[in-house]
Amino acid sequence: MHPDPPPEGYSHVESEHIENTGSGTLRAGIFGVSDGLVSNLALVMGVAGGTGQSGDAVVVAGTVGLLAGSFSMAAGEYISMKTQRETMEKQLRLEREHILAFPEEEQAHLGHLLVESGLSEEDARDIAQKVHLNIDPAVGFHALLELGIVPQQMGSPISAAVASFLSFVAGALIPLLPWLILPSALTESILVSAIALMGVGGAVTTVTGRSAWWGALRQLAFGGFAAGVTWFLGGLVGGQF
Ligand SMILES: [Zn+2]
């Protein structure tokens, strides 16, 4: 038998949640673009300011900065996700051992947690008893209620690392691209970067749920600040003022 189609306007809050935070890939992607854009914009502006807008110097620095940043982001993301995963797996293993060693105490504990969540004593006892008929659902419920972990939703470190790498490249390419085409591209670089900063800032709000304009302007302010400061300090170090 087919289940009824969901009513119009209904959507799984949960599935959105998995996509955004559970796997970490989309989140890592958006923040990777943002990081690549801001860091390489600052680098490009700093070198442009310090060398009297030498196109060659900007292209070398911008390309190296793009690669260095991408590798660093990918490695950081991989290690962070891997560590998180291993920590969760260890907690799940301990939970499983605990349930196998002390089934009655753990069942009672689950009942207690269910009562705390608002169920009646009787319902809680009933559900805890049914959940504890098999070890896998028992571990799953304990993991969720005690640790806030959903075992099936642990993200992949490799895919998060690849997403970080590629998205950082995409972001870092934006301020650099005009310099690859034109001999001196300061205005063009600032212009496309400003547009991209606003786009990324707006996209971030799809994860956080705030107003897109607010996100766009905030990102523009941060990116503009970073670019302005490095432009000035680059000029100072490069003896341009
Ligand atoms: Zn437990």
Image (cartoon, rainbow, N blue to C red):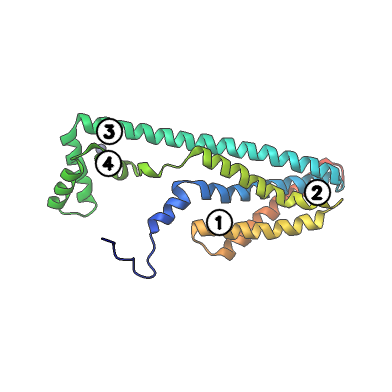
Amino acid on which the number 4 mark rests in the picture:
His
Q: Secondary structure at mark 2?
A: helix
At 39% across and 63% down in the image, what residue appears? Answer: 11
Q: Residues within 10 Å of mark 4 (few under 14, many from 20)?
A: many
> Which label lies toward us, 1 or 3?
3
User: Exactly how many numbered labels are in the figure?
Assistant: 4
Q: Residue 55: x and y, percent?
A: 85, 46
Nearer to me, 55 or 170: 170
Q: Earlier in the sequence, mark 2 or mark 3?
A: 3
Tell me if I can see residue 87 in this picture. Answer: yes
Quadrant location, ligand no. 1: top left
Q: Which residue is disc 1 drawn over? A: 204
3D distance between C-alphas at marks 1 and 4: 33 Å
Q: Residues within 10 Å of mark 2 (few under 14, many from 20)?
A: some
Q: Is mark 3 within 8 Å of ligand 1?
A: no
At 61% across and 47% down in the image, what residue appears? Answer: 167
Q: Is mark 4 within 8 Å of ligand 1?
A: yes
Q: Earlier in the sequence, mark 1 or mark 3?
A: 3
Q: Earlier in the sequence, mark 1 or mark 4?
A: 4
Q: Which mark is residue 142?
A: 4
> Which label lies toward us, 4 or 2?
2
174 displayed left or right of 202 = right
Q: Which residue is disc 2 drawn over? A: 180
Up the image or down, 32 lies above or below 199; here it is: above
3D distance between C-alphas at marks 1 and 3: 38 Å
Picture quadrant of residue 237: top right
